[in-house]
Amino acid sequence: MTPERTPERTTDSDADVRDEHGEGAGRNGRAVPGGGGPDSGRADRAEGRGGEVLPIADARSTWAWLWAELRTRWAEVVVALLVGVLGAAASVVPVYALGVLVDRIREQAPVSALVEIAVVIVVSAVVGGVATGAASYLVGRLGARILAALRERTVARALRLPVTTLEWTGKGDLLSRVGSDAAAIGKAVSDVIPTMIASVLLGALSIAAMAGIDWRLGLAGAVAVPLYAIALRWYLPRAAPEYARQRRAIAESSQRVVETVQGLRTVRAYRLEERRLREIGVSSGRARDISVSVFVLFTRFVGRVNRAEFFGLAAILTAGFLLVRSGSVTVGQTAAAAVLFHRLFNPIGMLLFTFDDVQAAGASLARLVGIITLPLDDAPDSADRPKDASLELRDVRFSYDGTTEVVRGVSIRIDPGTRVALVGSTGAGKTTLAAIAAGVLSPGSGTALVGGVPTSRLSAKALRAHIAIITQETHVFAGPLVEDLRLARPDASEERIAEALATVGADAWVRDLPDGLTTVIGEGGHELTAAQAQQLALARLVLVDPPIAILDEATAEAGSLGARTLERSAAAATRGRTTLVVAHRLTQAASADRIIVLEHGRIVEEGPHHELVAAGGRYAELWRSWEGHPTSTENKVRLT
């Protein structure tokens, strides 16, 4: 398991986050066009991204997925339809009985005959209401279950998306899909789809009832059908692209808001407030304008539907008048046919007007299906298993944009149980190299091996079992502290968790919490310091107990006073493990078995601390600079 390959929250000032991907690359793996300075990646994140988004499924793929889901729940589908048919049939009976009642009154029938009809009307109305309500519940429950499965699969697939995919597309698009898109589908499932099914069934049975009274009355009512079809034929081809554009515009607006909130301190540091507000205003205005155009289109559609209703009712009344005059039908039958058709106004209107929500839900469904149908970029389980705890990179090269290499022909071997530190100036490629070693990124060329087996031939499960990476950006999950730690090992006992906390030196402050291990932490709970959050991450590492650990500047956010404590915690958590440390503080590097110095994506020096200092090269320059830093005095460790 990889403890920190989860959605992240920076626990300290973003001003200290540095770009480690080389020139023109963002912090977490996205190339930055025109990037150059050490903070260019960070500024790009504040200024926003454009371009690529996550894929959207086409209509065929979306329908294929939905049909497959319905087939797996065929029993629920059949029961819901049968109850719906019962409800629609029972709703038609009172209208038919009303026609009989009109004729009985014209014939001056006795009161007892009228009472019988009244009883039929009341009973059928009650049965129709109960059955219609039950059908709506069954359809809504079926839809909710399908939506729940879709949400779970979407989140599960999103958690397995490559880091670079999320960096290129941005988190806003993904959040929009699992947020507003899922909400649009949820609204359709709970309100729209049950109404649509009830309307279809009631409409079909009402037309059949009109035809049963007299086929000519049914034919007159059918005059409205082609007019409805013409209205739909005009509306649907125009509406579908507009709704898709609306969802994309909303996603873009969400993306800009999310990026601005996440990079708020950077936005303020670069005085980008006005610029960001303008960009958010433009994207929000675009979404608003598209929504208005969709509403205008829908209003024109309503006018066409009203015309169809007018011509259909006029045709029934005209045909009924002629048939009554010729003696072919009775006044009651004509009245029943007219009422049946008039009753269709509401279900057909609901059916047509809910296409507004159906189009939005369809566009949202396509966006979610587009995620779950993404091909898995994971190696299948194979017979290959790491032979030992060694970690090796062979002639590794990597580029984020396909042109500028940020890692250039790096070869490293770390023997089992050895501790190696990566150092270098900002933009040297340290974090990129660590991500490749951990299997988070795939090298453009060359090979990353764990225990002699290429990471490309290891499944995600096998990788998590052998290697774990902890970054400086740790996330504290909301809930009891003990459950936060059990995310790393669900079966861990409280005794094992206490041992892990003691290993990293966190047992003292955990005991001082209001409720100890059961204290609620994270959002809305007890606020942890950056150093405490990082110790939790290290405790997770101890619980996972992988043979290989990678620490990517895992003490960078603690500040000068907490760094020494965290360095001790990190050393204890990785004792006995093969460890690769991306060293933010050179005191970490000085205690390593071997130090590798990177510059511009290449290895320029490597060896033990004392040899590199004596050699007077690039590492010696960094060490002298570190010794002269005003915050390094109390953290300095001299091993020369």
Image (cartoon, helix red, strand yellow):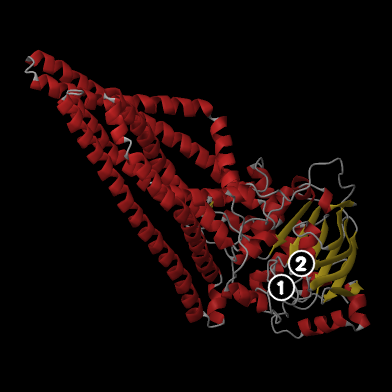
Would you call the spot at circle 1 few (<14 residues within 10 Å), some (14-19), or many (20 or more)? many
Q: Is residue 522 visible?
A: no
Q: Height in image: 461 above or below 581?
A: above
Please tell me in which quadrant of the rendered image residue 346 appears: top left
For the residues marked 2 and 1, what is the alpha-carbon distance in whole angstroms? Answer: 10 Å
In this view, which residue lies farthest toward the front?
326
Left or right position of 110 against 509: left
Element carrying mark 1: loop
- Judging by the rendered image, the residue that carries numbered circle 2 is 432
Residue 358 in picture, x, y percent from top left: 44, 47
Residue 474 in picture, x, y percent from top left: 63, 61
Depth check: give the residue in front, 639 or 218: 218
Q: Is residue 401 visible?
A: yes
Would you call the spot at circle 2 few (<14 residues within 10 Å), some (14-19), or many (20 or more)? many
Please tell me in which quadrant of the rendered image residue 383 appears: top right
Depth check: give the residue in front, 268 or 326: 326
- Nearest to N terminus: mark 2 or mark 1: 1
Element carrying mark 2: helix
Confirm or deny contact between disc 2 and disc 1 (CB under 8 A): yes
Q: What's the residue type where badge 2 is placed?
A: Thr
Q: Residue at x 70, y 71 (%)?
A: 31
Residue 621 in picture, x, y percent from top left: 83, 84
